[in-house]
Image (spheres, rainbow, N blue to C red):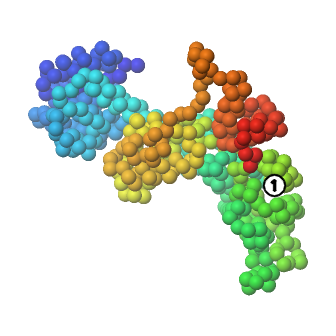
Amino acid sequence: MRRHVLIVDDDRSTCSLIELGLRPEGFEVSSVTSGPDALRVLETEEVDVVLTDLNMGGMSGIELCRQVAQRYADLPVVVVTAFGSMETAIAAIRAGAYDFVTKPFEMEALVLAIGRALKHRELRVQVKRLQAAVGEEGWSDDLIGTSPAMSGLRSLLERVAQSEATVLITGESGTGKEVVAKTLHRRGRRGQGPFVAVNCAAMPEPLLESELFGHVRGAFTDAKSARAGLLVQASGGTLLLDEIGEMPLGLQPKLLRALEERKVRPVGGSTEVAFDARVIAATNRDLETAIEQNLFREDLYYRINVLNVPLPPLRSRGGDVLLLAQHFIEQFSRQAHKDVKGMASPTAEKLMAYPWPGNIRELRNCIERAVALTRFEMIGPEDLPEKLRDYRSHHVVVAGDDLDELVPLEEVERRYILRVLEAAGGNKSLAAQTLGLNRKTLYRKLSAYGVSDK
């Protein structure tokens, strides 16, 4: 598709020279000799980039930048300024210009600047389109994303939300398991009831037992009064058992019995108390592996895994990365009282290339940092953490004609197995399923590669 560049310069010969340089590069080019003429063109024609001189009679280039930014927020403006006039260039950027080139300029530098501006425009349009698509589905406050993985997840949640069955949410750390649990709660029949969450890995077994089941007065030294457990407190609503894979083994049969009987016996008590809460469990552990290692009870696993909701890692969600990043930019710019509008195209490319091992939580922290550090309206690559700026894909490519560079078949298999395991976030069951191996075969191979079985 040919991109339309509008040139604005009060010197007709300069306009003609730039037109001759841009047309062979595949651009559709038109030109005017004043700011007001440029604004009239923009009212009637589709323009992708405005290229304007700063020093013009009548309306200045800076004023034109300001007018375009106010009327056409997604239309980038590249300004041409005299060499050494950095103060003027900065003033243009503040007025809304996307980039600048200095006179005298090489046509190649001008083409590169226009190319960057086009990428910026495409990014802004893409983010707005994705935001509109999410808003139409009514999930904008819950789960952001338009990738096939997220569309499938939302379809699953619509069906799961209305059920009263126990749900197990699985996924890597940082994929938004608690957000999904809250979404199921709000969209379910118990949405008006309490939502109670407990982290099973955050407290020792005696304290966790007391939190879940409650205790009677005098049950232990500090029990000066009776207290209802979280299962009872969540009655009429939802209880989230976060990190259930870390629950102490000795407490698991007590939880299983409570879920089966829908009753709990407070610590130190002799009578049982009924509860009516929907239970949602979440974990980033491979529970099937934990069962084989005698770290998790099989009967409890089947009791909590009535409905399974697997969450996709961020690296498998494509353009959702940019949509989430823009969402966080808007959120943190409001909190910081800064006018940060988006991200530069090179920044977007860095975000898309990075594998996000920490998933949404890592992206959120990255954008919060970038908003705090940036001095401009658009986040640049320099505002990103060093590991994102310097990231290079380390995917193994087995190719070439030089026999000295080729590797044995066993090495190809080793590299591929480790790559699949990495893509599965360390989930050996998922990796085995992807590879078409049973888990015991995969464990044996990983042991031979020196990979820990933990």
Q: Nearer the viewer, residue 120 or 4?
A: 120
Which residue is located at x 44 percent, y 52 percent?
Answer: 369
Query: Which residue lies at the image location 80% right of the left edge and 46% below the top edge?
Result: 288
Q: Which residue is more in the foreground, 84 or 444?
A: 444
Q: Position of residue 313 (x, y in %)?
A: 62, 42
On the image, the x and y values in percent for residue 432 come to 76, 35
Relative height, residue 239 to residue 64 (above, below): below
Mark 1 sits on what residue? 295
Answer left or right for 254 relative to 73. Answer: right
- Place residue 121 in its image quadrant: top left
Q: Quadrant of the N terminus?
A: top left
Q: Nearer the viewer, residue 436 or 335?
A: 436
Question: Is residue 187 shown above or below 67?
Answer: below
Where is residue 154? Give x, y as percent.
65, 42
* Looking at the image, residue 437 lies above or below residue 28: below
The answer to whether one can see residue 280 in this image is no
Amino acid type of the residue that numbered disc 1 sits on in the rendered structure: Leu
